[in-house]
């Protein structure tokens, strides 16, 4: 065995908050209006009131760049996916020497035909935003939005220990429900991409159920909490406290 490998430490139980009294929680106002569905907003507001009733100091706050997080995230994520997956060209990785006989283009097509539809979509769109003449207009602008959002979140954490939002703007989807509409599926990431862009530890907690806007039976709603970078113990402790609140 490699002597540098070490066994994983035994799992620890989630830490407890010493007290919820005085815990500072900022509710992200931009995540509670459109396109978040009204019933989801109602459940999240009820969840925020539950924290307040337990002694937390809960206030609404606004982050101006939050509305730009979703498009910025997908520009950056698609560019990174295209760059990382560019190695699957059928030459260095793929079906072997036999595939090379038909030429590089055919080898690449054969190798990538085995990738899923969503993977191929991300390679194509990512290549587009990185191509000459488009990089400044798309990727560089998205990177600037990310830097601005990180700054705004850092300022928010100077006042609050946790930030609260829905996990998604709608109740849970039925399995496979939005596969036919990728843009609608991407829009479901509205509330989680800011944490990905800024590298924030986050947790999603159950927060009741709501009927989807289009009708149907009630489905689960998620309440999301995030903390400053490197403070995973805060979100774990908060999740433990949420369970204990019942």
Image (spheres, rainbow, N blue to C red):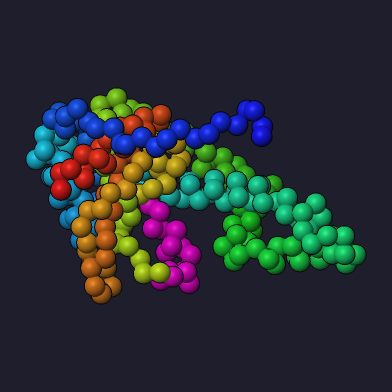
Q: Position of residue 179 (x, y in %)?
A: 47, 69
When the figure is inspected, residue 74 is found, relative to residue 19, above or below; the finding is: below
Residue toward you, 51 or 75? 51
User: What is the quadrant of residue 218 in the picture?
Assistant: bottom left
Asked which quadrant contains residue 4, the reply is top right
- Residue nearer the viewer, 235 or 12: 12
Residue occupying the point 33% across, 31% down: 233
Image location (x, y in percent) of residue 127: 65, 53
Residue 185 belongs to the span the image colors magenta? yes
Q: Residue furthest left?
A: 53
- On the rendered image, what quadrant is the N terminus found in? top right
Residue 79 visible at all: yes
Q: Position of residue 46 (x, y in %)?
A: 15, 50
Q: Is residue 245 above or below residue 110?
A: above
With 94 as the anchor, is 232 left or right in this view?
left
Residue ranking furthest to the bottom: 216
Work out whether residue 167 or residue 136 is closer to the camera in this orientation and state it: 167
Q: Is residue 50 left or right of residue 195?
A: left
Q: Nearer the viewer, residue 34 or 178?
A: 178
Q: Is residue 111 left or right of residue 170?
A: right
Q: Which residues are magenta?
A: 176-190
Taking the spot 26% from the left edge, 65% from the top edge, the residue there is 219
Give residue 8's position: percent from left, percent from top.
Answer: 49, 35
Q: Is residue 34 visible?
A: no
The image shows residue 67, relative to residue 107, as above or below, that is: above
In the displayed orientation, state which residue is furthest to the front.
Answer: 1
Q: Is residue 215 magenta?
A: no
Residue 217 relative to residue 1: left or right: left
How many numbered dots are placed on residues in this image?
Answer: 0
């Amino acid at each position: 065995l490699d002597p540098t490998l070490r066994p994983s430490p035994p799992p620890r139980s989630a830490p407890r908050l010493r007290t919820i009294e005085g815990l500072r929680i900022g509710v992200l106002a931009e995540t509670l209006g459109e396109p978040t569905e009204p019933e989801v907003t109602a459940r999240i507001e009820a969840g925020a009131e539950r924290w307040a009733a337990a002694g937390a100091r809960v206030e609404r706050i606004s982050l101006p760049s939050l509305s730009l997080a979703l498009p910025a995230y997908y520009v950056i994520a698609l560019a990174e996916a295209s760059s990382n997956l560019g190695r699957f060209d059928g030459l260095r990785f793929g079906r072997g020497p036999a595939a090379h006989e038909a030429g590089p283009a055919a080898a690449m097509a054969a190798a990538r035909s085995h990738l899923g539809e969503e993977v191929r979509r991300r390679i194509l769109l990512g290549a587009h935003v990185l191509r000459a003449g488009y990089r400044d207009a798309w990727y560089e602008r998205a990177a600037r939005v990310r830097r601005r959002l990180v700054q705004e979140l850092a300022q928010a954490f100077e006042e609050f220990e946790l930030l609260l939002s829905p996990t998604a703007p709608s109740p849970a989807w039925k399995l496979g429900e939005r596969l036919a509409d990728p843009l609608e599926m991407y829009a479901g990431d509205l509330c989680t991409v800011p944490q990905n862009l800024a590298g924030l530890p986050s947790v999603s907690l159950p927060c009741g159920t709501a009927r989807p806007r289009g009708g149907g039976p009630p489905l689960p709603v998620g309440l999301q909490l995030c903390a400053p970078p490197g403070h995973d113990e805060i979100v774990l402790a908060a999740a433990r406290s949420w369970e204990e609140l019942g």
